[in-house]
Image (cartoon, coloured by chain):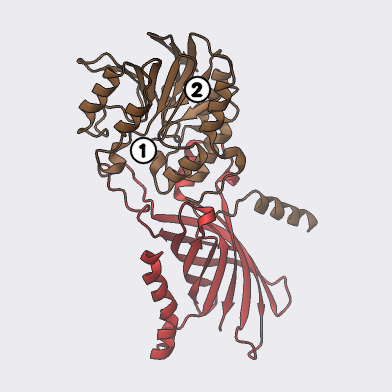
Chain colours: A brown, B red
Amino acid sequence: MVRGWWIICLFLGGCIFEFHPYEIRLTAEKQNLNAKAITRIQATVPHDTLRIALIADTQRAYDELSMIVRSANAQTYDFMLIAGDIAEYGLQWEYDQIFEILKDLKKPFVSVIGNHDYQGDGRHIFNRMYGPTNDWFRYGRFNFILHDTNSREHNFSGLIPDLSFLSNHLADSLTNLVIGHISPFSPDFDPNIFIPYTQLLNDRAVLLGVYGHDHSFKILKDEHTEVTYVVCPAPDKRFYLMLTVWSDDFELERIYY
Amino acid sequence: MKYYLLPIAFLICLPFAAYAQGSHWLIPDHVTIQFAGSMGLVAGGFGYANESNRMHLDLLMGYVPKQYSYNQLGVASLKYTQVIWRSRLLPEPWSLTPLTGGAYLTYTFGKNFRWPEHYAKGYYWWSESLRPNVFLGGNVSKKFDSTYSFSRITFYYEVGTNELKLTSYYVNPDMISPLQILHAGLGLRFSFR
């Protein structure tokens, strides 16, 4: 009988008293992850050349993500960028599962929001867990812009991505990289903003745009502009990208796992 | 808050209306209050039982205060509970039900929770507002004599999951244990008859 109760207690203890699928109950460890990662990044001395791991669309690929973490931990690089769609349904439970895997990364990781992260109150879970959907940070000679490009989640309002935010934070004296979830070439990107967006990135000499969403690896270029747009593969493609970037050029390497 | 006042008002009024109308079949057999279980920090409502007290149908209104979510949330739940195994282990007036099972559907009110509409039909196959859950549980109850307002008080627990966590488990059986997709709830049921 005593043993029976012990099993019941263990069983109940293993469960969570969840209030709602979209509840936001985050321990301090799981809050402001982007800001904490940026602080860690900026605490190290930047080299002229950066190596950055690029992943996207982790969604329900917990097993592949844990392989990415193991593979990345064996690499020499500065930090990881996650181009959105961390979760599939936007549930805090999912954000938690992904965090439990990502926290084993030896290097800092910075994320942008994807359309799946928006589901339900998922957008607000992202805000509390990772930080603002539009953010930026500088590291050495590089300026990184994290921005929300999920136009369709805003019914193509013309406000997402926020061009004035971009314009205000692109730095003319630094090498600019922009990271979003939906690339301007996707049908889910606001068609009314396509031209001003790509022109702004070109005019302000952005070296590289990094995105996800399409699940396949693509290098896209608009014929009228100089900017290169990289779409990261989803984890099921069994490789991720390692970006090596200098002040005026870059190189992409596929890391298979 | 205002967008879910109407269904709350309706739910609160229904039993009283039933008394007033003398519609005995509408008079609830019990009232229920529940903690957690993915239908609110607390949820309360009323329900009906069959003659043998083995089948229960509950209508519950749940509430999540702002400190546990982005905005306070209102959740309406329709829950069916079936007694699977009732034991005679405990002496009268106590009663032990080691195993119950059932399902509930929760509906979250609010503009953040809707049927998907931004993407092409079928892009998001799930609904943000409607969440089906299944559960197993158990309960202990005590019978009271007729001098009390309640003839029986039941303490129950239940452990369940929803379809989204189930699909996440289904594609990651090696990464997460089935225990990780469960959420639990505790409740009290006050039966009138």
Q: Cα distance, mark 1 to mark 2?
A: 20 Å
Residue, disc 1: A115
Give the amino acid at mark 2: Met
Mark sitting earlier along the chain (1/2):
2
Reply above or below: B24 against A103: below
Give the amino acid at mark 1: Asn
Helix, strand or loop at label 1? It is loop
Pinpoint residue B82: horizontal percent, then vertical percent.
52, 67
Q: Classify 10 Å Cα crowding around label 1: few (below 14), some (14-19), many (20 and above).
A: many
Towards the viewer: B57 or B43: B43
Towards the viewer: B164 or A140: A140
Residue, disc 2: A80
**Residue at (54% x, 72% y) in the render:** B32
Reply above or below: B5 against A256: below
Give a yes or no on whether discs 1 and 2 share a subunit.
yes
**Residue at the extreme right of the image, as rendered:** A2
Helix, strand or loop at label 2? It is strand
In the displayed structure image, the side of residue A63 where residue B113 appears, left or right: left
Image-quadrant location for residue A253: top left
Pinpoint residue B122: horizontal percent, then vertical percent.
29, 43
